[in-house]
Amino acid sequence: MLEKLNQEFFDLCEQRHKTGAEEYGPITFLDVDLPTFIYEEMADIVNYSRYLFIRMRLMEEIARERGIDLSAAFAGEVRDEDEVSFGAATFVPQSEISGFLPEKE
């Protein structure tokens, strides 16, 4: 599984490289201010990580309020013949996140 996911990542990287080369030219990266570009991309990654953290925590809070214990899933606990069982009671749609937040004043 790890090798499959590793290959999936490299395939995505290659596809992104090809898309960029088609849109901007195959060696345009040689003409950009690469350090500044990397710093901006790193800032974007940090922001995406922050957004993902917030979304995950909100989903945990929704689950907690519903009395759902997600600790087994996050800890990798194995149940029911090597599978963590999830059902309708444990499902928290992402669309419910904004409804969980207090109304803006």
Image: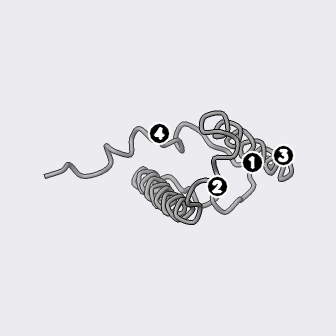
Q: Are marks 1 and 4 in contact (CB under 8 Å)?
A: no
Q: Which mark is residue 102?
A: none
Report whether 22 appears left or right of 96: right
Q: Which of pointers 2 and 3 lies earlier in the amino acid sequence? A: 3
Residue highlighted by disc 1: 9
Three-letter amino acid code of the residue under disc 4? Pro
Q: Nearer the viewer, mark 4 or mark 3?
A: 3
Q: Which of pointers 1 and 2 lies earlier in the amino acid sequence? A: 1
Report whether 20 appears left or right of 99: right
Residue at 57%, 66% (x, y): give it: 35
Q: Which of pointers 4 and 3 lies earlier in the amino acid sequence? A: 3
* Structural crowding at the residue carrying mark 2, measured as other residues with C-alpha within 10 Å and reported as few (<14), some (14–19) or many (≥20): some
Residue highlighted by disc 2: 73
Three-letter amino acid code of the residue under disc 1? Phe
Q: Which of pointers 4 and 2 lies earlier in the amino acid sequence? A: 2
Three-letter amino acid code of the residue under disc 3? Lys
Query: Of residues 15 and 3, which is closer to you in this image?
Result: 15
Residue at 46%, 51% (x, y): give it: 59
Residue highlighted by disc 3: 4
State the SS at label 4. Answer: loop
CA separation in Å, label 4 and label 3: 27 Å
Q: Nearer the viewer, mark 2 or mark 3?
A: 3
